[in-house]
Image: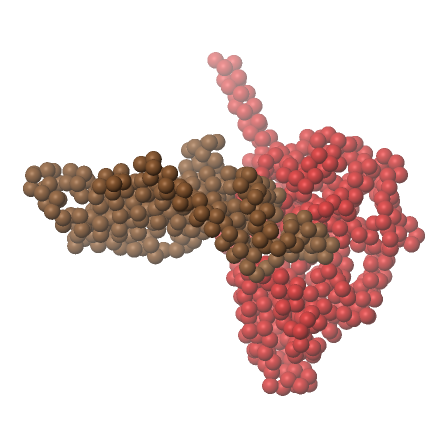
């Protein structure tokens, strides 16, 4: 009898320990990612999935320092035109192919030359790449490019199995093969993406889940309800309006990080005939608009104070922020004086286009009433996002309320927006000094030297204001209390190394 | 019957072609540029040019249409610009989901709507009639998204009876599949039940006044038999018409319901495709929906003939 009991107990123990190990982590995403090919994809949520699927050459710390990942070390030559990287030994891709210098060469080639690559501009500075030996790779640049390492900390640095890319071509995204902690199992569009633990992962001991399931649930209230009902273990991007209720829930943990991105008003200063208006032609009017906005109140009213008010492309908490220009207090009188000085004592009327979602519309409505008190009448044109983007790009707008998801390197948050001919310079702003500051900032790998250039650029931006910055979103994750070890990162990614679940 | 069906299907072909031309043109009239969306945040000009060339956006629209139609005739509806999945595969994946939702919603609607309609017609003017009317009206007036979120909060979060959202294929786990679908089907069904109840009620009222019902009663038939066998059967003809028309409403309602309950069906697919200007997907869905709609209408016409043999071919 006693033996029976012992056996029974052992069986129960074996069964339950089996349960403890067969763990699935369920993560609620705000959107359904696009194609799962790092060279082709363009969505933020796609990058969240890659954080578990595709390791990169380098990674970042929460403080934005570049740290080793698939590359264990790197060195620049004297004039910053050659980058030599040492690669990690013994790494294999999910299909068993070895990761080595040849694989890096093939990956860079695909990012640069694949017909459908969206990464071309990110790796443009690479003139050639060569496998010095099995674990050493040398990049030769056409000009010094301090931003390259940060690019390698994102999609351009994700390593895909060269065998898989050669075989699948454009269709790689239907069955991605990388070298990350999890392998791709299945995807049902708009329903779920399931990844399975990669047993040969070089840091497998840090991975505590057998599977991870990403579930796109666009409605934030429903996403939170799913977490509360136990159908999810964690979610990303909680709406600021739900923050109070999530924080009050004893069963949930809330984690936050100020994002690298921003929301702003882009002003048309030289993009076709629609720039010919007081706002587009007159920096003083743009400064008046900026001064009329109470950014702290905007944050309180729309985001319950959870976001970070801002006035530069970098958040006030960023090391790149120019502290000489703090977020301005609202000053209606000064705004009126600026308008009068510019010859618009009777006020001006401007049209601002805004994406037709409730949050951005509310942001603009608050600004509309604030600016109105300073004599700036704002007419809102609510547009569906694809239309807004097309109009903005074509110059068919006066001002446009849009944002940027943010990049690790400061260059990614300002260069293309403010330099003459920049790819996303929809303001068509052009100033030789600004071009000089921003181009110079790319040349040095010394942060102190770069900071000087960015400080000068920000001073210029505060004067000319082709973009009026408003605030920096804060990433809000909500986790079930039994999830441990999660670290919030300012890039909004979910890194599962060291994350575990207690039953 | 067969000749009737063949005739109807032949007439449907030009309609389908017209629908596809119309939608193709309409999509290209929409403001917004799919390539700009696809190029990503950076909108690299080089990338934009390559994508335009690759997806034939430089061709004139009629040429693009003919290319699409040519492929469609061979059963190739193109690929999704967003995920590169073949459109036909996507539709095959999503259609069963929405059909399951629609069928379950319709069953719920019929189970609630028709008995309620019969009862309130039979008990016209009494409190039963009033209660049925009030319930029906509120079902019609309460917005889907509100009812959906309230149900999730009550049934899933508070009571923990049903999963809050998501989807399980019927083939994998039938019970769980029905459980996940129950709330959305209910939300979708209640709105339709109201319409159904009103139509059943008015049809029953007019039938109950007719001579043959009086005759049936005079023959001394049981009231239940008079009601179900004689009155309801005839009253159902207009109700069947309504059910077919409601099919469209069901698909439209599914768009919202699927969004709330995160069901990976047709509705969610089409909304995302329109917002991303995923032309091939929108085109494919409209084509399939159009065909389904025509098919439902043919089925309804066939159903009339079964319910009322006098309507058959001369």
Q: How is the image coloured?
A: by chain
Query: Up-down: is A125 above or below A305?
Result: above
Question: Where residue B304 appears, x then y in whole percent?
Answer: 28, 42
Query: Up-down: is B303 above or below A126?
Result: above
Tell me the residue at 69%/78% (across/down).
A282
- Looking at the image, residue A498 sits to the left or right of residue A297; the answer is right
Decide if residue B271 is in sight here: no
Tell which of A169 and B140 is nearer to you.
Answer: A169
Q: How many marks?
A: 0
Question: Where residue B29 appears, x then y in whole percent?
Answer: 55, 59
Q: Quadrant of the C terminus of chain B?
A: top left
- Looking at the image, residue A447 sits to the left or right of residue A379; the answer is right
Question: Where residue B213 appears, x then y in whole percent?
Answer: 13, 44
Tell me the residue at 55%/36% (across/down).
A503
Query: Up-down: is B103 above or below B60?
Result: above
Tell me the residue at 76%/53% (across/down).
A121
- Looking at the image, residue B54 sits to the left or right of residue B171; the answer is right
Tell which of B82 and A470 is nearer to you.
Answer: B82
Q: Quadrant of the N terminus of chain B?
A: top left
- Looking at the image, residue B132 sits to the left or right of residue B212; the answer is right
Chain shown brown: that is B
Q: Colour of chain A?
A: red
Tell me the residue at 20%/48% (across/down).
B204
Residue B160 placement: quadrant = top left
């Amino acid at each position: 009898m006693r033996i029976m009991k012992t056996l029974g107990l052992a069986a129960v123990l074996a069964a339950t320990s089996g349960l403890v190990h067969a763990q699935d982590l369920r993560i609620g995403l705000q959107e359904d990612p696009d194609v799962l090919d790092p060279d082709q994809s363009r969505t933020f949520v796609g990058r969240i999935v890659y954080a578990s699927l595709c390791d990169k050459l380098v990674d970042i710390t929460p403080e934005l320092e570049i740290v080793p990942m698939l590359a264990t070390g790197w060195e620049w030559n004297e004039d910053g035109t050659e980058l030599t990287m040492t690669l990690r030994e013994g790494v294999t891709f999910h299909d068993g192919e070895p990761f080595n210098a040849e694989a890096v060469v093939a990956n860079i080639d695909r990012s640069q030359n694949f017909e459908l690559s969206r990464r071309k501009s990110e790796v443009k500075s690479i003139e050639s790449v060569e496998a010095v030996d099995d674990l050493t790779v040398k990049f030769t640049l056409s000009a010094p490019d301090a931003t390259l390492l940060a690019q390698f900390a994102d999609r351009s640095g994700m390593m895909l199995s060269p065998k898989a890319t050669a075989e699948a071509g454009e269709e790689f995204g239907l069955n991605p093969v990388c070298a990350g902690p999890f392998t791709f199992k299945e995807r049902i569009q708009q329903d779920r993406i399931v990844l399975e633990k990669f047993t040969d992962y070089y840091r497998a001991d840090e991975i505590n889940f057998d599977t991870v399931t990403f579930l796109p649930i666009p409605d934030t209230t429903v996403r939170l309800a799913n977490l509360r009902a136990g159908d999810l273990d964690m979610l990303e991007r909680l709406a600021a309006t739900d923050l109070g209720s999530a924080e009050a829930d004893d069963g949930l943990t809330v984690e936050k990080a100020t994002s690298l991105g921003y929301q702003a008003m882009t002003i048309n200063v030289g993009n076709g005939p629609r720039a010919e208006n007081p706002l587009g032609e007159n920096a003083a009017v743009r400064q008046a608009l900026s001064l009329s906005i109470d950014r702290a109140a905007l944050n309180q009213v729309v985001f319950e104070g959870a976001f970070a008010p801002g006035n530069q492309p970098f958040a006030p908490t960023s090391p790149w922020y120019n502290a000489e220009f703090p977020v301005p207090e609202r000053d209606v009188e000064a705004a009126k004086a600026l308008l009068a000085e510019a010859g618009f004592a009777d006020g001006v009327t401007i049209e601002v286009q805004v994406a037709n979602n409730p949050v951005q519309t509310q942001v603009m409505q608050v600004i509309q009433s604030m600016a109105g008190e300073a004599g700036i009448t704002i007419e809102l044109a609510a547009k569906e996002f694809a239309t807004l983007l097309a109009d903005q790009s074509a110059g068919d707008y006066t001002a446009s309320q849009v944002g940027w998801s943010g990049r690790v390197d400061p260059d990614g948050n300002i260069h293309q927006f403010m330099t003459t001919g920049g790819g996303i310079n929809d303001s068509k702003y052009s100033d030789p000094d600004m071009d000089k500051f921003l181009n110079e900032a790319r040349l040095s790998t010394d942060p102190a030297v770069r900071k000087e250039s960015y400080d000068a650029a920000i001073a210029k931006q505060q004067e000319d204001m082709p973009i009026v910055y408003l605030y920096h979103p804060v990433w809000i994750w909500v986790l079930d209390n039994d999830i441990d070890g999660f670290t919030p990162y300012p890039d909004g990614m979910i890194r599962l190394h060291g994350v575990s679940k207690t039953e | 019957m067969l000749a009737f069906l063949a005739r109807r299907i032949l007439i449907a072909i030009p309609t389908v072609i017209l629908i596809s031309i119309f939608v193709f043109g309409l999509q290209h009239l929409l403001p917004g540029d799919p390539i700009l969306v696809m190029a990503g945040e950076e909108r690299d000009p080089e990338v934009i040019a390559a994508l335009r060339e690759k997806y034939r956006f430089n061709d004139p629209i009629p040429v693009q249409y003919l290319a699409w139609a040519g492929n469609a005739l061979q059963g190739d509806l193109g690929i999704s610009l967003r995920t590169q999945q073949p459109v036909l595969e996507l539709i095959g994946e999503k259609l069963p989901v929405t059909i399951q939702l629609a069928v379950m919603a319709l069953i719920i609607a019929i189970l609630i709507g028709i008995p309620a309609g019969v009862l309130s017609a039979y008990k016209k003017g009494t409190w039963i009639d009033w209660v049925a009317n009030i319930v029906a009206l509120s079902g019609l007036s309460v917005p889907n998204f509100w009812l959906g979120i309230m149900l999730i909060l009550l049934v899933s979060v508070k009571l923990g009876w049903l999963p809050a959202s998501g989807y399980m294929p019927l083939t994998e786990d039938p019970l769980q599949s029905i459980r996940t679908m129950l709330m959305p089907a209910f939300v979708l069904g209640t709105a339709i039940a109201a319409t159904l109840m009103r139509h059943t009620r008015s049809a029953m009222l007019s039938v109950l006044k007719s001579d043959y019902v009086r005759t049936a009663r005079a023959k001394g038939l049981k009231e239940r038999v008079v009601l179900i066998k004689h009155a309801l059967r005839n009253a159902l003809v207009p109700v069947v018409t309504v059910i077919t028309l409601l099919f469209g409403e069901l698909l439209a309602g599914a768009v919202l319901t699927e969004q709330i309950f995160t069901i990976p069906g047709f509705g969610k697919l089409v909304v995302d495709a329109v917002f991303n200007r995923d032309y091939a997907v929108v085109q494919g869905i409209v084509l399939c929906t159009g065909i389904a709609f025509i098919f439902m209408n043919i089925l309804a016409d066939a159903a009339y003939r079964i319910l009322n043999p006098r309507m058959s071919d001369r």
